[in-house]
Image (tube, coloured by chain):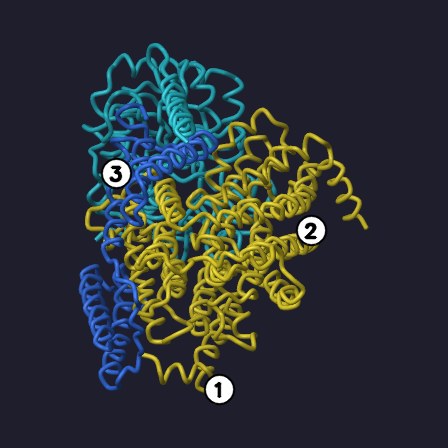
Chain colours: A yellow, B cyan, C blue
Amino acid sequence: MEVFKDLLFGFSVVLQPMNLLYCFFGVLIGTLVGVLPGVGPAAALSLLLPVTFHVPPVSTIILLAGIMYGAMYGGSTTSILLNIPGEAASVVTCLDGYQMARKGRAGPALGISAFGSFIAGTITIFMLIFLAPPLANFALKFGPPEYFALMVLGLSIMVYLARGSIVNALIMVCFGLILGTIGLDQMTGVPRFIYKSTTLMDGIGLIQVVIGLFGVSEVLINVERTFKQEIFETKMKGLLPNREDWRRSIGPIGRGTVIGFFLGIIPGMSVMIPTFVSYVVEKKLSKHPERFGTGMIEGVAGPESANNAASTGTLVPTLSLGIPTGAATALLLGALMIHGLRPGPLLIQEAPDVFWGLVASLYAGNVMLLVLNLPLIGLWVKILKIPYHFLFSLILLLCIIGSYITNNNPYDVIIMVIFGLVGYLMKKFDYEAAPLVLALVLGPMMEKAFRRSLMLSEGGFGIFFTRPISASFLIMALLILLSPLFLKRTRLRENLRAGG
Amino acid sequence: MKKRTVTRKSFILCVTLVCLLWVGSSQAQDYPKSPVQIVIPFGPGGLTDIFWRSTSEFIASNIKGTIVLVNKPGGGGVVGTSFAVNAKPDGYTLVSANSDPLTISPVFTPNVPYDPEKDVTYIAKLAVMAFGIAVLNDSPFKTLEELVAFAKANPKKLKSGVMGVGSTPHTILGVFNRDAKVEISHVPFDSGGETVTNLLGGHTDLAVVSLPSIKSQILSGKTRILAVCSPKRLPDFPEFPTMGEKGYKKSSIATGVGLAGPKGLAPAIVSKWEEAIEMTLKDPKVIAIIEKLGGVVVDFKSGEGYKRELLADLATFRELLPTLPGKK
Amino acid sequence: MGRIFFYCNLFWLLFSVLTCVEAYRLTLGKINNPGPGFFPFGAGLTMLILSLAALFQSMARKRKVEKTTPQEPFRWWNIVIILAAITAYAFSLEKIGFLINTFLFICLLLKVVEPQTWKTAIIGGVITTIAANLVFNVIFQTQIPRGLLGF
């Protein structure tokens, strides 16, 4: 088939020694970037942009794509080992991944994360090749009403996310929604809850909140009492996932891939959302949902695959329409533009070596990351062996730098401190962080979509229901929200009775 | 045992010394003695960011120093701009002086922590980014006049995607609405990219976007521009008329990219930069890079010239303030 | 122990009331033309209802929460010290500079939170500072301030 010929051509481009070197370099930097909290792929990409001038266009693209992927891989490392999300998308991995590490199963967690990402990446690359143009056009149909409906659906699945008291989780959602409104209102320019602080002008930084809620609070909980009990189980139970792990993970990986890819295509979709969806889906499908949050490997395999799949998904509108879906893809596009390449429908025709070289390099990058990361698992696991009375100071330093670096603003660190305290209190009083974070991310998107929809319809609510896509999402959300009423004896119902 | 302690101590001492030397050796002669920090008040990947990253190397070699680009995004450019203009005027902290935070935000956003007239030393203007009114290729409006005619007959029916309050497109639409005496509704989005996406999906009827963000759509034939907001026709798209030609000169607002610093910056430092930048912008290599971005036109002005231009814009916007939507 | 939950819910109650008040000041707009205050007001209102519900629930039933009395003392001062140290680090970073600040920070933590000998604290501080400098300033060229002594 025509496509395979092109693909082979792409591989021939990539497999040139120079390009392979760039690929390797890219994924290496990307991994390091991903591991460090607060430094996201966008930062790395923009730092390296000047370097790319001296490098031919194809190699540039290969390098940059490698970084993007590597960052996705790396982000889960600190999530699993230290409960610090390397970037917002890795938050969900903290939930069960870190617990696995505490039980001495850091190796399998890291391993399944690497393998899951690899499998997801490989599959989605093929989906990218074959489905890109029709998918991109489908993605365009998502206007404000569709976004709103999708966000509502996203929040409704939160019902299944909560482990403990439902009411407490809902309060967390409201809290997250309110926090999300802090900042300059983009639509009217009115400052909301800023109280003259320039730091808050753009809202409460997600990274700072997440690092505080997860990373710092975890340290605080651990230093409450003397370190007589081991924070981390020292006897490592294996470095790689065993057969049992694989058996349990195959399903989540598959589902995560599909969920991640299709959600990732939607322009502007945060990569974080597919990971939440995957987590909830796995929890719902599991025979032991109550054990999620204590170290279930499905809770790592699914979201990690979704993560990687979504990254590939974001390339769909980028490459086929020339529309960036986030900071990282925007930079990729910018790099292309500087080299005189025009991403979009014409890219394939005008610069086939770039396009197919990119696609082939995505695959090569995935392989390289797997090869790079697996041996590293042994190294990472050793980090956990550092005695906690020293390790905790490193963790805190990492948190501080991570929070500071996004904007070079010391007040961001203060926000982290505040949320570290908040997170600590939440842990003590049985409030969960995950719904809060989800609401913090979804809230602003939902609100903007709502207001824009009303602007488009000049105030009519019908717009949500006359458009087929948004109507279906809203109906699904309604069904999900009402489902507990129909399910007779569910953990949910018992929870509702016991909660409060 | 004692021997080990001594060796350990001297090891630490050596290491510390090495660190000190390493840090200390980054001093050179004359200004700029150490790396100059240029703050980019927008996030990585945005047009301003790409612009500076593409050109800073050349500028740095012309001024014989090192430039370090720092992103401090937030508030539509206000956060980064405020940080830089409130820094010490020693010439080592400068900022990419974009028009939006200097002429639009002070008018629309309350409590902007600087006065664009008094608190800023303008160094130079580098380039201008043009915006345009775009529609889908199969849109019924072939010319700006047709658009205006329809809008007059159907107030509030047309929806235009723009970037949020405090941005140039928002202001352009506001001024246009006033001058053409029409009521095209604003639908604010977060970025140029989002605005373009929604136009492509048919969710808005038209969009006011920067040329670079829509360039590939124009070339692929999906969209076209009814008018560009720039003083002259664009070199890459000479077929699009300017707003001025259509009689809406006031709506022809472009975003300028320049360099500025805190007040009290030494004139000697300012002229050094002016010279270096002027030299850079004459280099054909640099011009080629900038033009590849599409819709960005090199437009060198001295610090004084830029200041006059920006202050004039500021005055114009202050006049407009009460007439624009989104303001109570 | 049940009392604590009562106070928690009370906190949320107050928080939501505050939010609603502030949101109201931001103009609510109409339902089909919402203003900036609309969304926060809605969220605040929902939280209000939820916290009231939770409040009544916690009052109405006895919480049978077992509290295992731990053997070790509850070292709340550690928490305070850590948070204070981080705050101090944040504020002094731009004045003192990265290297010195990091060194002091690590030394402080190692010495105070889980007491180590001076030797361990200082060596730990130095190693960490050097490593961090290597990673962040050299490899990544991230712009962490150099402060007074050019450090």
> What is the x, y in percent for residue C30?
27, 67
**Which residue is located at x 52 percent, y 36 percent?**
A334
> Picture quarter containing residue A244?
bottom right
SS for tag 2?
A: helix
Rendered-image quadrant of the C terminus of chain A: bottom left
Residue labelled with disc 3: B317
Query: As rendered, which of B74 and B110 lies closer to the eye?
Result: B74
Residue labelled with disc 2: A129
How far apart are the two marked residues, 3 and 1, measured between alpha carbons?
A: 60 Å
Residue labelled with disc 1: A487
SS for tag 3?
A: helix
How far apart are the two marked residues, 3 and 2, measured between alpha carbons?
A: 48 Å
> What is the x, y in percent for residue B131?
43, 38
10 Å crowding of disc 3: few (<14), some (14-19), many (20+): many
**Which residue is located at x 69 percent, y 39 percent?**
A357
> What is the x, y in percent for residue A16?
73, 33
Say whether residue A413 is left or right of residue A59.
left
Mark 2, chain letter?
Answer: A
Mark 3, chain letter?
Answer: B
